[in-house]
Image (cartoon, helix red, strand yellow):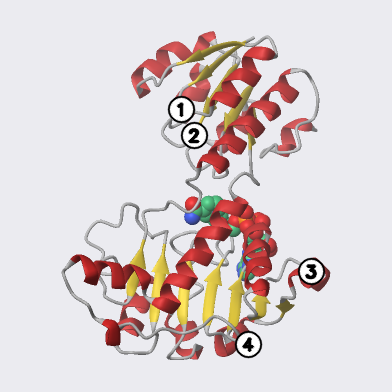
Amino acid sequence: MKVLVSDSVSQGAMDLLKKSGIDVTYEEVSPEDLLKRIPEFEGLMVRSRTKVTKQVIEAGKNLKVIGRAGIGVDNIDMPTATAKRIAVVNAPRASTISVAEFAFLHMLNMARGLSAADASMKKGEWAKKKFKGNELYGKTLGFIGCGRIGYEVGMRAKAFGMKMVAYDPYITQQVLDPASIKLTDLDTVLKESDFITIHALLTNETRGMVNAAAIKKMKKTAFIINCARGGIIDEKALKEALDSGNLAGASLDVFENEPPTGSPLVTHPKVCASPHIAASTKEAQEVAGVTTAEQMIKFIKGDKPEFIVNKEILK
Ligand SMILES: NC(=O)c1ccc[n+]([C@@H]2O[C@H](COP(=O)([O-])OP(=O)(O)OC[C@H]3O[C@@H](n4cnc5c(N)ncnc54)[C@H](O)[C@@H]3O)[C@@H](O)[C@H]2O)c1
């Protein structure tokens, strides 16, 4: 069995593939070379650099499994993979803690203005009076979407003494009880929260969900954090709300277009921006690589992988 690893993955993942008797080639091939080389391989492991297009999948005459060492499979042509009965496996839990910690970091930063204070110091200022922040203790944190990452943010916010409300139409209160998060409707989350953190999936339902009408319902003193996916917040509406003083600030790790070249939000004084790095930790990358390798090995050996994206091919 031959597997091509065409993006850099953790050493643990490479070792695991080799240990299970797989003939592993690691080469960051160009799109042209990938098309030429892919017929040799039964497995392909990628992160996000490699684009596994329709042409690549069709050229992969021997391809049986594609591993995505991470979560999003936007770089893989899923309909073609499924039509060819090629399994696509991933590691959906690998970055949960990293993203939760990063969203929390953004929230603390919004509350205390740490990045702005640091930028001011670097300009030679000593602007003590400018940086009067807020405590998180006793404040209400609202969640839009509260799955794996939202729950972990909640566990951390509980330790900070925050009250929590969440809107997520696809989960039950029972799941959120250990984190003391109260499941409610979207309007309550918008109206009651001092901080809103988005952890929903990007779907047709959630695209543009945080629009001008939703922002209008929020407190003028509220902060919003998006470490989920660009597109859930209507960026134009967000900028207008920040400009007009209808919202206190926003922390964004994700954008409608990435990189957000020329976006007025990135340079906005009420915005703290980061370049989609919430999941970028050594730990998350290690777990993503190893989990994906495990999943690929399971499929190759004829076992059922837990994290198969196109489950329909198992039928
Ligand atoms: N910034 C990053 O680098 C990074 C890294 C990993 C994940 N993410 C993103 O974080 C988000 C959450 O990931 P997760 O692992 O917690 O996923 P998850 O599937 O565990 O949770 C997502 C939640 O969204 C909810 N949801 C779906 N439709 C909804 C709707 N209409 N309204 C409200 N909630 C809705 C689901 O019920 C689910 O509970 C995803 O958008 C994911 O793409 C970002």
Give the mark, 1 or 3, whose residue is nearer the N terminus: 1
Q: Which residue is mark 4?
A: 188
Residue 91 position, x and y percent, is 63, 40
Mark 1 and mark 3 in contact? Answer it, CB < 8 Å: no
Residue at x-position 23% and y-position 69%: 121
Separation of marks 1 and 3 at Cα, in angstroms:
37 Å
Q: Residues within 10 Å of mark 2 (few under 14, many from 20)?
A: many
Comparing labels 1 and 3, the label whose residue is closer to the camera:
3
- Where disc 1 sits, the SS reads loop
Q: Which residue is mark 3?
A: 178
Residue at x-position 58% and y-position 85%: 139
- Between 193 and 231, the residue placed more toward the observer is 193
Comparing labels 1 and 2, the label whose residue is closer to the camera:
1
Q: Is residue 233 visible to the viewer in this orientation of the structure?
A: no
Separation of marks 3 and 4 at Cα, in angstroms:
21 Å
Q: Quadrant of ligand 1?
A: bottom right
Q: Residues within 10 Å of mark 1 (few under 14, many from 20)?
A: some
Separation of marks 4 and 1 at Cα, in angstroms:
44 Å
Q: Is residue 66 left or right of residue 54?
A: right
Residue at x-position 43% and y-position 17%: 27
Mark 1 and mark 2 in contact? Answer it, CB < 8 Å: yes
Give the mark, 3 or 4, whose residue is nearer the N terminus: 3
- Where disc 4 sits, the SS reads helix
Give the mark, 1 or 2, whose residue is nearer the N terminus: 1
Separation of marks 1 and 2 at Cα, in angstroms:
7 Å
Comparing labels 3 and 4, the label whose residue is closer to the camera:
3
Q: Which residue is mark 2?
A: 47
Separation of marks 2 and 4 at Cα, in angstroms:
38 Å
